[in-house]
Image (spheres, rainbow, N blue to C red):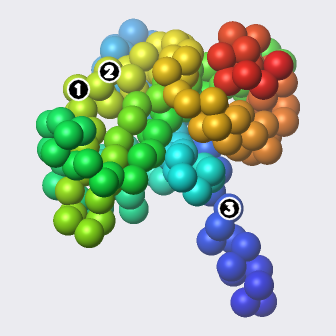
Amino acid sequence: MEENKEKEKKTVNFNIIKNDPTDGHKGFGVGVLNLENVSPVFVDVQEKTAFVDIGAMHARSQVERGIKFLKTKEEVPNGKPYWLVWVTIERKESGPFYYGVTACELTVDRSIRRGYKSFPEHVNKMDKSLKGHIMVEHMDESSKAVLADFLKNHDRGIWDRSSDKLKQDLGAE
């Protein structure tokens, strides 16, 4: 029983798009930003791991918690590097696919409780992901491989239905 609970804790799924909240009508709720189909994926550059942390939607992820973010990387010279990747899933007739994938960098130095991230960049990249952009070309090759493996292993069908651009930009095809 304890083993099942441990397994459940480690399994974090992506948010899959739900029904249209407006149900086709053009009234209340139209034009409202729907974040149900976007998930924040962290890539730990040094550990070569990736994980979903929904807390990042409000800058409250495990990585960000307790850290004061400064405006320049130079102010945090010993920061541990991460990529925060906004992954948007949409649905087409054949099933769900990775629609938008955009990466932003951040660094964290736990010893001084400081870090670096550009808040405007993070908001803009989330918006770009929601609009279907693929923006991962600026990531290091190792992190791209980690992200590609993570996305493939999450659900091979979603990966297979995704764009060739995503697969090429991540160096996976």
Give x and y (percent) for residue 115. Answer: 25, 51
Q: Residues within 10 Å of mark 3 (few under 14, many from 20)?
A: few
- Determine whether, in the image, residue 148 is placed left or right of residue 129: right
Give me the disc on residue 124: 2
x, y (%) of residue 119?
23, 33
At mark 1, the secondary structure is: helix
Tell me: residue 65, above or below residue 84.
below
Contact check, label 2 and label 1, Cβ < 8 Å: yes
**Residue 49 to residue 28: above or below:** below
Residue of label 1? 120
- Residue at the image point whose x is 68% and y is 24% from the top: 170
Spatial CA distance of label 2 from label 1 is 6 Å
In terms of sequence position, does the residue under pointer 3 or pointer 1 come before the other? Answer: 3
Residue 96, horizontal then vertical, whole percent: 73, 27
Rendered view: 86 above or below 55: above
| Image marks 3 and 1: residues in contact by CB distance under 8 Å | no
What residue appears at the point 69 percent right and 10 percent down from the top-left corner?
Answer: 165
Q: Nearer the viewer, residue 169 or 130?
A: 169
Q: Amino acid at mark 1?
A: Pro
Q: Which residue is labeled 3 in the image?
A: 11
Q: Nearer the viewer, residue 144 or 92?
A: 144
Amino acid tagged 3: Thr
